[in-house]
Amino acid sequence: MSDGELPAQAPTPGSVGARLRAAREAQGLSLAEVAARTRVTQRFLEALEMDRLDLLPSPTYASGFARAYARAVGIDQADVGRAIRGELARGAMPLRQHHIEEIADPSRAPSRGLVIVAAGLALAVLVLGVLWLSTGMFRGTTEQAPEAAPSAQVASSKEVPPPAPTPAATGKVVLTARNDVWMRVYDGAKQRLFEGTMKPGQSFEVPAGTDRPMINVGRPDQLTVTVDGREVAPLGDGKRAIKDVGISAEALAARGLPAPAPSASTTPPATAANTTAAPGDAGQLAAFRDVAR
């Protein structure tokens, strides 16, 4: 007997328990060795040997344990199984009914103090939420009044219309030569509109609707530029040639009016040099034409 759990009791001669015990002792095996072979708890094997089927978990376990015991000690397990079932059917050894009851684990249940604290926190959160909502409603009604003043300011500011944008200058652009001057006029796509030497008094009108008209000219001071008949500031002072200068009505309007002419007392007398081209002008024009091209 193991663990001191089973009382000493001799098996009934010729019973299943007596047969199993006799076979074990004939092979010189201990209950521990049979338990190792069958992997059945030793106290259940002891109950089988003492015919204490009431100590086994159920009839199914009783039959299974007895067959495993018989197989381990070398006797007919089928015959042992039938004998166990016959004894159970006769009720000579009623089995004890094992009721498995779930034991509540106190460590899993929250303590009373923890429950009280959790309930208090939940109540506090609920109260704070109600207070926040109520104060938010009052705050919303009180903040509506100050908003009236900014709205009045916005209304007053809207009464003053913004200044109307200055319309883009549009009009007829005319280039008039004061002296022999070579120039090249083209649009934003580099399509040539005019190229050549203009004679004094000769004019060229930029076609209306030209996209970003531009000019290359060797002596910009020798050109008079007008927009809708009004003269604008010169394109250059004549000290150097200019290239890729915009001559649209908008660009020319942005240049402003020409500088006022000097008074008659300071105007030098006209000479041939002032009204005619210098001898070297033709060479300069030819050189600039080659560079511009």
Image (tube, rainbow, N blue to C red):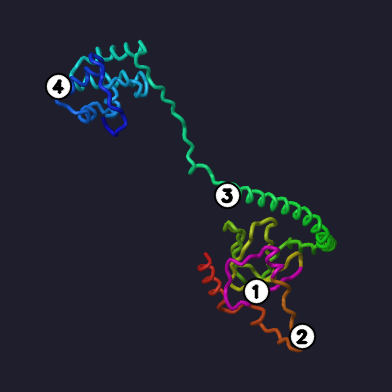
Q: In the rendered view, does 209 fall on the left or right side of 282?
A: right
- Residue lying farthest to the bottom in this orientation: 265
Q: Is residue 288 magenta?
A: no
The residue shown at (59%, 69%) is: 217
Q: Mark 4 to mark 3: distance in Å?
A: 64 Å
Q: Mark 4 to mark 2: distance in Å?
A: 152 Å
Tell which tag, 3 or 2, sits nearer the viewer: 3
Tell which tag, 4 or 3, sits nearer the viewer: 4
Would you name the residue on which mark 4 appears?
A: 26
Question: Which of the two labelled residues, at mark 1 and mark 4, occupies the earlier sequence position?
Answer: 4
The residue shown at (56%, 72%) is: 285
Mark 3 crowd level (few <14, some 14–19, many ≥20, 10 Å Cα): few
Q: Mark 2 to mark 1: distance in Å?
A: 20 Å
Disc 3 secondary structure class: helix
Would you name the residue on which mark 2 appears?
A: 263
Question: Which of the two labelled residues, at mark 4 and mark 3, occupies the earlier sequence position?
Answer: 4
Would you name the residue on which mark 3 appears?
A: 113
Residue 35 image-quadrant placement? top left
Q: Say what amino acid the circle numbered 2 marks.
A: Ser
Question: Which of the two labelled residues, at mark 3 and mark 1, occupies the earlier sequence position?
Answer: 3
Disc 2 secondary structure class: loop
Residue 222 marker = 1
Tell which tag, 3 or 1, sits nearer the viewer: 3
- All told, the count of numbered labels is 4
